[in-house]
Image: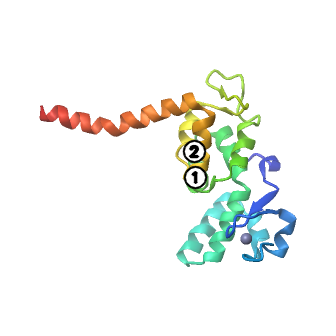
Amino acid sequence: MTKNNFKLNYIKCPNCKNILDLTDVARGCPNPLCQFSFKGLEALLVKNNSELHKAILSAYKGNDERKIKLLATAVRNYIAVYLANFIQYAWGSQMQRLFKNFIILYLDDLNALQIVLKSKVIKPDKDNTVISKNNYKIFPELYNYLMRVHSTEIRNFLRLEFPKLYRDWYKKMHERSIKPIISNQSRLV
Ligand SMILES: [Zn+2]
């Protein structure tokens, strides 16, 4: 695993989206209308990804809403680490799980994505690397993966930052969605 240079030094309150310094966590969310308690978060921040995933499944099973929010906060704190690992060690089955269990659902912090796309985990001199005007780097296969994340903010950024890749992606999606209709029609004729 890539070490902590991708670990974010802040968390977002899962209730009000306030950005908090990690050292403020002990005091709880400072927003007087929210006051979410982060008690228990520190223990979650040292868990590895498979432990976190197991804990998330069990929190959902037990309908433990506060625990679910704490776990999501821990995952989001590591989301840039997961993404960097996914890129570096892709595309084995363990990395696919990382994508499916965490990145697709919890990557919703533009800053986390931008840190990774500006970092050395994407080599600028590879043939298929695309560098945007603002110096973000990506390559088509990664682009197509990231266009699957649930966050519209992330997908909007990718659309605007990499217009050519977006057009290719869009064309591919469009072709995929109209193919069955065409083949049905040709059968009818
Ligand atoms: Zn809050």
Is the C terminus in the top left, top right, bottom left or bottom right quadrant? Answer: top left
Q: Amino acid at mark 2?
A: Arg
Q: Quadrant of ligand 1?
A: bottom right
In the image shown, does 160 or 11 lie closer to the viewer? 160
The structure residue drawn at horizontal position 57% and vertical position 31%, both measured from the top left corner, is: 163
Location of residue 115 in the rendering, given as x and y in whole percent from the top left corner: 75, 43
In the visual, does 166 lie left or right of 44?
left
Q: Amino acid at mark 1?
A: Ser
Location of residue 33 in the rendering, given as x and y in whole percent from the top left corner: 73, 77
Question: What label does residue 151 carry, if any?
Answer: 1
**Which residue is labeled 2 in the image?**
155
Q: Quadrant of residue 70?
A: bottom right
Q: Is residue 166 above or below residue 106?
A: above
Q: Secondary structure at mark 2?
A: helix
For label 2, the crowd category at 10 Å Cα-Cα, with few meaning under 14, some 14 to 19 and many 20 or more, is some
Q: Is residue 65 above or below residue 134?
A: below
The structure residue drawn at horizontal position 56% and vertical position 79%, both measured from the top left corner, is: 62
Location of residue 65 in the rendering, given as x and y in whole percent from the top left corner: 61, 76
Contact, CB < 8 Å: mark 1 with mark 2? yes
Q: Secondary structure at mark 1?
A: loop
Query: Is label 2's Cβ within 8 Å of ligand 1?
Result: no
Total marks shown come to 2
In the image shown, does 102 or 136 lie closer to the viewer? 136
Let me know if residue 99 appears in the view.
no
Location of residue 170 in the rendering, given as x and y in whole percent from the top left corner: 46, 35
